[in-house]
Image (cartoon, rainbow, N blue to C red):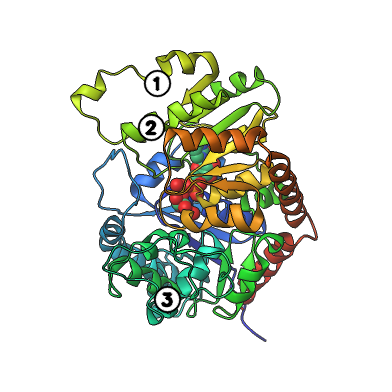
Amino acid sequence: MANTITPHVLLFPMPAQGHLLPMTKLADLLSHAGLYVTFLATEGVYQRCFLRDDDDRRDQPRFRFRTVPDGLPRESSRPFVDTLDGLLGVVGHARGPYRELLASSRGGGGEGEGELWPPVTCVVADGFLPFALDVPVEMGIPVMVLRTSSPCSVWAYCCIPELIKRGEVASPDEPNLDESIQGVAGMEGFLRRRDLPGFVRKAQSADDPGLQFFATCSANLTRARALILNTFEALDSPVISRLRDVCPDVYGLGPLHLLGRNVCSTPSGGDSGKLWREDRTCMAWLDRQPDRSVVYVSFGSITVISREELLEFWHGLIGSGKRFLWVVRSDLVAETSADEKTETPLELEEGTRERGCLVGWAPQEEVLAHRSVGCFLTHSGWNSTLEGVVAGVPMVCWPFLGDQYTNSRFVSEVWRNGLDMKDAGGRDVVERMVKAAMDGEGADELRRSASKLAEEARESAEEGGSSYLDYQRLVQQIKSLSS
Ligand code: UDX
């Protein structure tokens, strides 16, 4: 008879907000299924996101945190990775301790709180951390990969060799962004160069480091036991099918925040896993606004804009005549000059005081679910996109980097639950797009599509739905790896 070891999963997210949140939800789901869970965080992220008295994840008998160094100065204002160089820096510091942790776990040295922890039987590695996969593969520990960005971008990255072969990327000249792209199978009808993920769209040559990094991440999918995606069949079935040809087992567990809510009864929102503390005063402000009257504006966790761009958005919002709730993170605007620092802060401007509310960080899931929110002006980060889908709120997309360029194209052309204003952030465009999404000619149509997607998302995460079933299947596969 096979010798069964207690299943113990180690999850290792990339230190960035959009990666931490879905990995945290996945960790909760696996813990809820009775598995031992080690959540491996970099030191800066652990301190800022999880080292809190009210974080109930910290005291569970089968759930523990472990940390690896990140090499960032203590109390760094941005203890996360937002560039390729930043990522390589973390790898240099974290790789050795990560290997030691896995080795000591195998040697039975994994002491937990009052109990001897079983060895790690499976690693779930962030797909943007190639070394998080390399190390356990070398040690013979099974690895699965979680890709936290959109499946459409994961597939586009898989097509990098084909794009290079066809000469569709890596142009040293000024590329024609409106050129339609044929090299990403299944997206030929609507994908333009402009809609390719950031690193692909901007690559200057075939050996561009960004392009090569994402090609490596894609090649790694063939080495993983399974690929876990934050999506659901009804939203992404064509792309999921293509990815099934790349990786033997693909699981669509999305929207993870909804599945987590259903399975583990975790409340929506809360600060656990968040790099900033929520300012909940905006909920009372929303309560005072009429139904579907507010534009919620948020550009996620990484975006940095100039003061000029900030003002263009502000004038566009004021010009639209709509009320707005805007997340202006403390690090959203790039370092300003002495002159700009003396300008009136936006929150004191008359237009803002009349019909706006500015916060540093919002309880986004709750905000999107509020009856007064009528549209979401978003950077199209994948988590925000899914949260908008779950809330059934039409979107106006202003992508800033990475998969966001592809996501916004899918919103406008495939799912048809929003408008894409990519590469155009001027005040007139902002005003026009916001008006169109709130109450323009096509607004009813957008709302209908958004409501349909929300219903499909809800069904997928309910018992018997596609994501719920994939969750159960995933737990079984992880258990089978330890027998
Ligand atoms: C990054 C990339 O930008 C994104 O494209 C990729 O898919 C994942 O990593 P990020 O900029 O962090 O993501 O955006 P997003 O994926 O949307 O994640 C932001 C998260 O922060 C969301 O879950 C959102 O709910 C949360 N958030 C944002 C808040 O809780 N409050 C806020 O005020 C703003």
Kindly tell me whether residue 163 is visible in this rendering: yes
- Residue designated by label 1: 346
- Residue designated by label 2: 310
CA neighbours of label 1 inside 10 A, class few (<14), some (14 to 19), many (20+) = some
**Residue located 58% across and 57% down the image:** 410
Q: CA distance from mark 3 to mark 1?
A: 44 Å
Residue type, mark 3 in image: Leu
- Residue designated by label 3: 163
Question: In the image, is residue 311 above or below residue 244?
Answer: above
Residue type, mark 2 in image: Leu
**Residue located 64% across and 60% down the image:** 253
Residue type, mark 1 in image: Leu
Callout 2: SS? helix
What label does residue 241 carry, if any?
A: none
CA neighbours of label 2 inside 10 A, class few (<14), some (14 to 19), many (20+) = some
- Check the picture and name the quadrant holding the N terminus: bottom right
Kindly tell me whether residue 270 is visible in this rendering: no
Q: Nearer the observer, disc 3 or disc 1? A: 3
Q: CA distance from mark 2 to mark 3?
A: 35 Å
